[in-house]
């Protein structure tokens, strides 16, 4: 049995980027439906350390228009690959340790598809959505985060690893 | 046979393009701006746009992180063709999530 994919079911008007506090209950409510018995969620949270240094907050910024478009593309791709509904939100601005920076919810008839779709969305988001963050350390210094592997969408030069 | 003497041809406008360049993250500090307009010869690639931006910097150029490109809000290779009026973004290493 297969449920129809709901391409762009969230619509273009609902932004994936926000400066507001993220709410998992709201995100889950967006993907729930009576025929979907498995809901997988992912929450990315600001942690208090990086490379052995003490982090006090992160400052997120984005290429807003493209980040929105890329989130929409990823949501569409997930709905084409699995019979799922997915929702994703990324927070921007200054976040403290413990704040949620990103949330993904994926609902499917069964758990395997929900887990797979949820994993796909967060991995593609990290790989493709143009968002940057600057770490503020306990000693007052600030550093732009360059993920190992160079980040980017696979078109970063091979020697581009940070 | 008479030699045909052409007057020096003015550079036609169509031989150059102007693109809007957006930069992000640490590039904003390195360039001192988040957007700029550059004009360059046609045909041009995303990589050409990057070099045109570099040319606007005082030398020696500051150290630039490894960059990816987007043309009109879609990820693009350095070799991607760029047309007049395009929006070209220089993307430092992405760090969402």
Image (cartoon, rainbow, N blue to C red):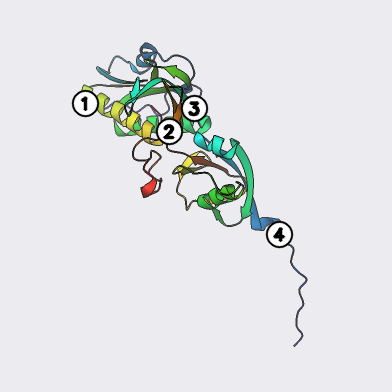
Q: Nearer the viewer, residue A161 or B6?
A: A161
Q: Badge 1 local density, few (<14 within 10 Å), some, or many (20+)?
A: some
Instruction: Look at discs 4 and 1 and give the one toward the viewer.
Output: 4
Q: Which residue is mark 1?
A: A112
Chain at tag 1 = A
Q: Which residue is mark 2?
A: A129
Number of numbered callouts drawn: 4
SS at circle 2: loop
Instruction: Look at discs 4 and 3 and give the one toward the viewer.
Output: 3
Q: CA distance from mark 4 to mark 3?
A: 40 Å
Q: Are marks 4 and 2 on the same chain?
A: no
Instruction: Look at discs 1 and 2 and give the one toward the viewer.
Output: 2
SS at circle 1: helix
Q: Which residue is mark 3?
A: A61
User: Left or right of A1: which side holds A76?
Assistant: right
Residue A155: where, in percent of width, then height? 40, 46
Q: Badge 3 local density, few (<14 within 10 Å), some, or many (20+)?
A: many
Q: Is residue B1 above or below residue B71?
A: below
Q: Which numbered dot is residue B12?
A: 4
Asked if marks 2 and 3 touch (Cβ < 8 Å), the reply is no
Who comes first in sequence, dot 1 or dot 3?
A: 3
Q: Are marks 1 and 3 on the same chain?
A: yes
Q: CA distance from mark 4 to mark 2?
A: 38 Å
Q: Is residue B59 above or below residue B91?
A: below
Residue A96: where, in percent of width, then height? 42, 16
Instruction: Look at discs 1 and 3 and give the one toward the viewer.
Output: 3
Who comes first in sequence, dot 1 or dot 2?
A: 1
Q: Quadrant of the C terminus of chain A?
A: top left
Chain at tag 4 = B
Q: Nearer the viewer, residue A82 or A61?
A: A61
Q: Is residue A116 above or below residue B40?
A: above
């Amino acid at each position: 049995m297969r449920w129809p994919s709901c391409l762009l079911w969230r619509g273009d008007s609902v932004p994936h980027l926000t400066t507001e506090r993220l709410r998992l209950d709201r995100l889950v409510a967006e993907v729930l439906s009576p025929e979907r018995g498995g809901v997988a969620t992912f929450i990315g949270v600001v942690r208090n350390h990086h490379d052995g240094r003490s982090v006090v907050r992160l400052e997120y910024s984005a290429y807003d228009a493209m980040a929105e478009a890329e989130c929409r593309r990823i949501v569409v791709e997930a709905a084409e690959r699995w019979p799922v509904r997915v929702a994703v939100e990324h927070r921007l601005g200054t976040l403290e340790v413990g704040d949620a920076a990103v949330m993904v919810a994926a609902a499917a008839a069964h758990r395997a598809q929900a887990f797979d779709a949820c994993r796909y969305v967060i991995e593609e988001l990290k790989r493709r959505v143009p968002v940057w963050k600057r770490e503020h350390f306990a000693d007052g210094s600030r550093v732009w985060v360059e993920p190992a592997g160079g980040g980017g969408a696979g078109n970063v030069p091979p020697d581009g690893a940070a | 046979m008479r030699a045909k003497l052409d007057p020096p041809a003015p550079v036609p406008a169509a031989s150059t393009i102007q693109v809007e360049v957006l930069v992000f993250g640490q590039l904003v500090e390195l360039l001192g701006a988040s957007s700029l307009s550059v004009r360059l010869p046609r045909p041009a690639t995303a990589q050409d746009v990057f070099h045109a931006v570099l040319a606007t910097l005082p030398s020696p150029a500051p150290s630039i992180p490894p960059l990816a490109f987007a043309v009109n809000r879609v990820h693009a290779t350095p070799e991607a063709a760029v047309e007049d009026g395009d929006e070209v973004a220089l993307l430092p290493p992405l760090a969402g999530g």
